[in-house]
Amino acid sequence: MPFLTRAGKRIGLLGGSFNPAHDGHRHISLRAIRTLDLDQVWWLVSPQNPLKPVSGMASLEQRMEEARTVASDSRIHVTDIERELGTRYTVDTIRALRRRYPDRRFVWLMGADNLVQLPRWRHWRMLFRIVPVAVFDRSTYSGKAVNGKAARRFAGARIDDCRAYRLAAMAPPAWVFLRGRRHAGSATAIRAHRAAEKAGGRD
């Protein structure tokens, strides 16, 4: 993977199963680069998301290949580095990345749907304490997200979106909720469509 070597790079981290990757992931990534003044976004394709079932999960190789096709931008890098690091949980991955790349400034990127379920994540409070977080508006989840447990717990660390370009340089906890044009892309919908096409082909 072509990680940059120049010190001080500002990197957005977008983790997930990418089962499959879609234009919504790309939309968030490019918006993050613009709004947060990032140099790159790394797609951390998880070998196996601990909150998702193994059933229906495409192979890591297939998900990586599709993600590279969808990313289609030199500033978006697709990696399975969690397999190399041997990490399974986001908080452990971020700690390992900070040790390996101490000169980078990382920002964790997530959709509003993930902020809603964040309290189910391992050591989710620690996540906010070790990396700045950017949350992107997503359909019907946004109301629940900004009023949910995680948002309330770190309400004092939330910054106005007009200061989002400074987020990567801020000491955590610091997070921002970014409203704006939403993207309708959904991995769940894509999988359902593919399954329907496959079933139709057997008739």
Image: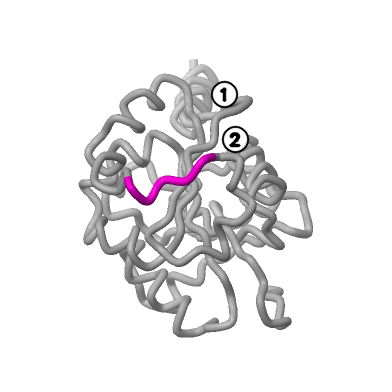
**Label 2 near label 1: C-beta < 8 Å?**
yes
For the point 22% across and 59% down, which residue is it? 122
Q: Is residue 157 magenta?
A: yes
Q: Residue 92's quadrant in the figure?
A: bottom left
Q: Residue at x 59, y 26 (%)?
A: 182
Position of residue 80 measured from the top left corner of the image (x, y, whole percent): 51, 66
**What is the span of residues highlighted in magenta in the rendered image?**
156-160
In front: 97, or 8?
Answer: 8
Q: Is residue 17 above or below residue 61?
A: above
Q: Is residue 55 above or below residue 64?
A: above
Q: Secondary structure at mark 2?
A: helix
Locate residue 115 relative to residue 11 in the image: left or right.
left
- Left or right of 158? Residue 29 is right
Residue at the spot x=50%, y=84% of the render? 100
Q: Which residue is mark 1?
A: 184
Which amino acid does the dot numbered 2 rest on? Answer: Gly
- Which image quadrant: the N terminus? bottom right
Label located before the other in sequence (1 or 2): 2
Q: Residue at x 36, y 62 (%)?
A: 90
The local crowd at label 2, few if under 14, some if 14 to 19, many if 20 or more residues have their Cα within 10 Å, is some
Q: Nearer the viewer, residue 1 or 20?
A: 1
Front one among 158 and 101: 158
Q: Position of residue 156 (x, y in %)?
A: 33, 47
Task: Name the residue tied to disc 2.
Answer: 24
Q: Is residue 125 left or right of residue 176?
A: left
Task: Please provide percent x and percent y for residue 115.
Answer: 35, 41
Q: CA distance from mark 1 to mark 2?
A: 7 Å
Q: How many marks?
A: 2
Query: 183 and 129: which one is in front?
Result: 129
Badge 1 amino acid: Ala
